[in-house]
Image (tube, rainbow, N blue to C red):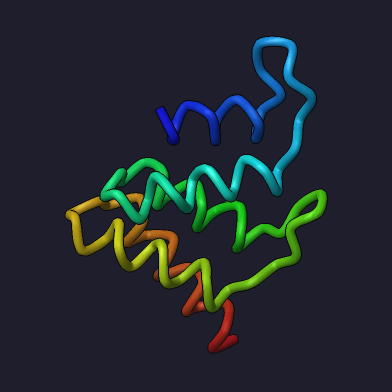
Amino acid sequence: AMYHLGYIYSNGEGGVERNAKEGLEWYVKAAREGDVEAMINAGHILHAGTEGVPRDDERAVEFLKMASECGDSVARATLGNIKANADA
């Protein structure tokens, strides 16, 4: 349920006004409960920075590492891109 609330707010679904900050809060709650998709989405929002959510690669890496440790290849690839851009 927390992941779905994050999705609804992040994407402005179901008549709900888009609110990335509120969406991130729900993704973070879901991620802390072990939801891998929420970990990835929280990491992507934090890495990109968006309306009301400043870019925060340190926090993005925290969530993407959690997803990577659960075996997610998308999170692993995103971590590699963040590191490559930081080293460039």
Residue 17 on image: x %, y %: 79, 24
Residue 45 on image: x %, y %: 61, 52
Residue 88 on image: x %, y %: 59, 86
Residue sitting at 51 percent across and 66 percent down? 60
Q: Quadrant of residue 86?
A: bottom right
Q: Quadrant of residue 35?
A: top left
**Position of 43 relative to 33 (above/below):** below
Residue sitting at 62 percent across and 40 percent down? 23
Most foreground residue, 60 or 35:
35
Horizontal side, residue 43 vs residue 39: left or right: right
Residue sitting at 30 percent across and 56 percent down? 67
**Position of 46 relative to 34 (above/below):** below
**Position of 49 relative to 74 (above/below):** below
Horizontal side, residue 70 vs residue 18: left or right: left
Most foreground residue, 15 or 80:
15
Horizontal side, residue 59 vs residue 74: left or right: right
The number of numbered discs placed on residues in the rendered structure image is 0
Residue at the far top in the pictured view: 14
Horizontal side, residue 77 vs residue 68: left or right: right
Most foreground residue, 5 or 85:
5
Most foreground residue, 84 or 66:
66
Residue sitting at 30 percent across and 49 percent down? 33
Name the quarter where the N terminus is drawn. top left
Residue at the far bottom in the pictured view: 87
